[in-house]
Image (cartoon, rainbow, N blue to C red):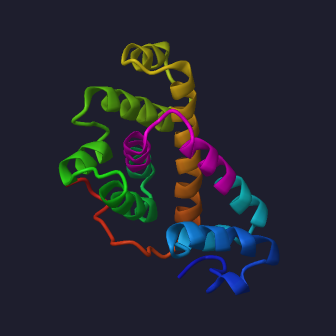
């Protein structure tokens, strides 16, 4: 049971959120609970969708973005986001089970991707206060300054959704995964 209202339909959401939710439905074919619970604040939903849309046009590919999302959700202990990003990682980013498990453990089968994941995990654990060595390592792995900024932004947006879903107890509407890494 959620801790705040979960609008059961687009029509029952706050008026200002309705066109935003309609856009989500058009894009995804449905409106996952994350979007519905965030719709309680049309401003928060608009901000989330805006940043998410901008980052989708950024330098990082879908696979890297999903790897980061999986690692961040694991560190933050967000069951909803683990389920959602395991589904998206499998069906959209085409990550295999071994890669998803590695990402959740803060690793990757791809050397460059692992550097991004390690940096993302450090950002979460250190609450942004990473060491010079962390920044040097991500640069040495071949990430540009724009990509480094985008990794930080992806950690931030995923932390936002982790906190929303955990704090508000959003019902999981994706196939549930174990909170423990296999």
Position of the C terminus, as image quadrant, is: bottom left
Residue drawn where x is 42% and y is 55% of the image = 77
**Pick the front one: 120 or 27:** 27
Residue range in magenta is 49-70
Q: Position of residue 101 (x, y in %)?
A: 24, 49
Left or right, 65 with reference to 110:
right
The x and y percentages for residue 172 are 44, 73
For residue 150, which quarter of the picture?
top right
- Residue 58, position in %: x, y? 56, 37
Residue name at image x 63 percent, y 85 percent: 9
In this image, 150 relative to 19: left or right?
left
Magenta highlight on residue 66? yes
Q: Is residue 55 above or below residue 142?
A: below
Q: Residue at x 72, y 80 (%)?
A: 13
- Which residue extends farthest front? 26
Q: Is residue 127 visible?
A: no
Query: In terms of depth relative to the viewer, which is nearer, 45 or 124?
Result: 45
Main SS of the magenta part reads helix
Q: Say above or below: 88 vs 17.
A: above
Residue 48's place in the image compared with 118, above or below, is below
Residue at screen point 56% across, 56% down: 161
Question: Would residue 5 be counted in the magenta stretch?
Answer: no
Q: Position of residue 16 (x, y in %)?
A: 81, 71
């Amino acid at each position: 049971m959620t801790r705040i209202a979960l609008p059961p339909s687009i029509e029952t959401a706050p008026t200002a959120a309705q066109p935003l939710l309609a856009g989500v439905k058009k894009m995804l074919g449905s409106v996952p609970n994350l979007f519905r619970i965030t719709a309680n604040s049309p401003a928060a939903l608009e901000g989330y969708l805006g940043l998410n849309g901008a980052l989708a046009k950024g330098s990082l590919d879908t696979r890297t973005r999903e790897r980061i999302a999986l690692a961040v959700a694991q560190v933050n202990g967000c069951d909803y986001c683990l389920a959602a990003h395991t589904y998206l990682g499998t069906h959209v980013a085409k990550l295999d089970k071994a890669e998803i498990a590695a990402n959740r453990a803060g690793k990757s089968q791809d050397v460059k991707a692992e550097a991004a994941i390690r940096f993302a995990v450090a950002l979460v654990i250190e609450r942004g206060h990473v060491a010079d060595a962390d920044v040097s390592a991500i640069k040495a792995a071949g990430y540009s300054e724009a990509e480094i900024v985008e990794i930080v932004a992806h950690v931030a947006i995923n932390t936002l959704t982790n906190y929303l879903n955990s704090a508000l107890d959003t019902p999981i509407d994706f196939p549930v995964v174990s909170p423990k890494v296999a």
